[in-house]
Image (tube, grey):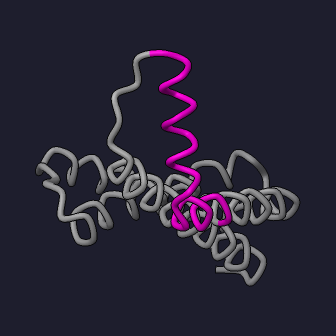
Amino acid sequence: MTSQLAFVVGLIVLTSVCDTVNHLGLKVCANAVDIEVAGLRSVARYALRFLRLPLAWVSIFFALLSLFLWLYALTKADLSLAFPIDSMHHVFIALASRFLLREFVSWQRWLGTGCIMAGIVLVTMSGLAA
């Protein structure tokens, strides 16, 4: 793997890690602020309760960090290479859901996750040929 490709893949993996932290935090916060949303007023109450949680702000920070890392990665790679590799966050989310959130992940989801990983490997290998 060329050093430029390795750098780009590393940036995109870091973006995916930031996305995963963001989504895990959002999930935990959404579960903590269990409220019935039945109108504009209840949506506003839900949003205010949500934003009072420190983890919500950590999640927002990681979302912004991911965005800026992604924008930088796009300056270094073709979108047709970068975007498929960015699917890595699907793999990280499946792993984090199972092992950190203790959610059930069916064998079909693991199979799909394996297909995503195979696709990422193929796309990355195509970057070597370019």
Question: Residue 73's spot in the image, x, y percent?
Answer: 78, 63
Question: Residue 116's spot in the image, x, y percent?
Answer: 39, 51
Q: Point out the image quarter for the N terminus.
A: bottom right
- Tell me which segment is drawn in magenta: 39-61
In the image, farthest residue toward the right? 75
Q: Which residue is drawn at 40% across and 17% down?
A: 38
Is 81 colored magenta in this rendering?
A: no
Question: Residue 8's spot in the image, x, y percent?
Answer: 72, 70
In the image, farthest residue toward the bottom? 3
Question: Residue 125's spot in the image, x, y percent?
Answer: 56, 64
The answer to whether 1 is drawn above or below residue 123 in the figure is below
Q: Which residue is drawn at 32% across and 66% down?
A: 96
Residue 37 falls in image quadrant: top left
Image side of residue 82 versus residue 85, left or right: right
Residue 7 falls in image quadrant: bottom right
Q: Which residue is drawn at 88% across and 59% down?
A: 75
Dominant secondary structure (helix, strand or loop) of the stretch shown in magenta: helix
How many numbered marks appear? 0
The answer to whether 37 is drawn above or below residue 49 in the figure is above
Is 52 colored magenta in this rendering?
A: yes
Judging depth in this view, the residue of 48 and 126 nearest the camera is 48
Image side of residue 86 versus residue 101, left or right: right
Q: Point out the image quarter for the C terminus.
A: bottom right
Specify whether residue 118 is in view.
no
Image side of residue 20 versus residue 57, left or right: left
Specify whether residue 102 is in view.
yes
Image side of residue 110 versus residue 44, left or right: left
Judging depth in this view, the residue of 18 and 112 nearest the camera is 18
